[in-house]
Amino acid sequence: MNQKSIKALLGMKADQQDIVVKGWVRTKRESKTFSFLEINDGSCLSNLQVIFDQNIPEYANLTVKLTTGTSVKVEGRLVSSQGGGQSVELQATLIAIYGLADPETYPLQKKRHSFEFLRDIAHLRPRTNTISAVLRVRNALSMAIHHFFQERGFVYIHTPIITSSDCEGSGEMFQVTTLPMDKVPLNAGKVDYTRDFFGKRTGLTVSGQLEGEICALALGDIYTFGPTFRAEHSNTARHLAEFWMVEPEMAFCDIAQNMDVAEAFLKYIFAYVLEHCQEDMAFFNHWVDKTVIRTLEHISQEKFERITYTEAVKKLAAAKIEFEFPVAWGKDLQSEHEKYLTEQVYKKPVMITDYPKTSKAFYMKMNADDKTVRALDVLVPRLGEIIGGSERENDYEQLLNRIKSLNLNPADYHWYLDLRRYGSVPHAGFGLGFERLVQFVTGMQNIRDVIPFPRTHGSAAF
RNA sequence: UCCUCGGUAGCUCAACGGUGGAGCGAGCGGCUGUUAACCGCUAGGUUGUUGGUUCGAAUCCAACCCGGGGAGCCA
């Protein structure tokens, strides 16, 4: 027997004998002497139409048992379809059931469900069109990211998940401890971390950047791609407590080259997914956001806008519309400001650089004006910030002064400072929120629907 | 964490102080190369939880729990 994925079958010619398909029933349309099944095996969005009649064993029994969600093996012949919805279909000679799905209790129905409802049944939602398409696109995007960097000679680095370095300013950390929570050892009234597993306070990483810099200053160009954890009480459609982040770091690289890489990176990925996920992307374009394909095609060709923070503030100050939050140099750009720039003024991704030093992290390179740092935010329409990065401060004295002026303890950063004491070079990098990328590419509104098992404040089910 | 809207049948919603309904889904029957199938019938509910106001609460009030949207923080 010739076992095939549905994806492979749908590309084959009719009149193939002894085909075997295994998958799950999506719907059934039955009549007295023959019935239709639609089978999905996850290999692609499309279902395979199976036609079976009373000549196959157990026909009457099968029409009762083959309800939505049932897992089956179908043997038969691939024939050209007489109906209009598909070119080929499987004329079954045998249907065997692996597992039933009681229609009285199986939550997935042959109708549309809200994403909110599907989140409550996250163990079953990958069986839906939208979520399975998301997961296939997610997979393709992962591959695109590796392809892009590997083609350019970047080395894939695995930075630690458990870390003792709190990348200051990157958000609250989840603590990692083996100390007994009901009887925490104390020393002079404070938690005695010398008795903890690592002998010091540790947490889950909020960024692999600092370790990435270590490796970039030895290997040249590197990237990380791994899970990241932030214990923020964020409750929005674009925040997760556990998410995946891509962080390239490049030695002998300044802010301008950093922007070049970020732009080429996004364009490469968009073009890749348009080429490799045509069926899934057509689905998103039809059912989720009717502009996604046009937007991706447009962006993968257009040049990204590049402006400084100061120029952005001028643009906003000249805007004819009234903002809820007033614009002034030195203040952070609000969501409404970013939306205005990407959606009203430029209608494409905007790269903003040279932010006031007060609103950015300590490790960003200071400009000659001593007021701004070489930060880089890449903003996209609808979502806002998808990439955040910078040229790093590579001057030892400057970095030490920044650490001190922010009341951080230089001893905590001794190895980070060492990178500037020994063979320091200009270097730069950025972080891409992987789930935000999936959101942007698919048009999905809520970040919880582009990761198989979302972790957010107050929710870690499944 | 703040603001805001919501929680009623398996799902999506209506009823807005006076005996809780519809569509879809499900079950049963019928019909047709069907494909958002179609036609008929049936079942399905302590209205998120707890307390309060009232002769009477899904409806008004309070607290809590859960969810959506927005904000902040960021990727």
Image (tube, coloured by chain):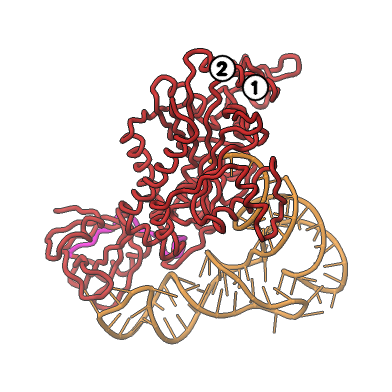
Chain colours: A red, B orange
Choose between A96 and A444: the one closer to the eye: A444
Residue A289, placed above or below residue A370: below
The image's mark for residue A403 is: 1
The image's mark for residue A417 is: 2
- Find out whether the residues at labels 1 and 2 contact each other: C-beta distance under 8 Å: yes
Q: Is residue A455 visible?
A: no
Name the residue rendered at 47%, 36% in the picture. A256
Dot 2 crowding, Cα within 10 Å, few <14, some 14–19, many 20+: many
Q: Amino acid at mark 1?
A: Ile
Q: Amino acid at mark 2?
A: Leu
Q: Quadrant of residue A64?
A: bottom left
Q: Residue A51, percent across and down?
A: 23, 69
* Real-space Cα separation, disc 1 to disc 2, in angstroms: 10 Å
Which element is circle 2 on?
helix
Badge count: 2
Q: Which residues are magenta?
A: A93-108
The image's mark for residue A11 is: none
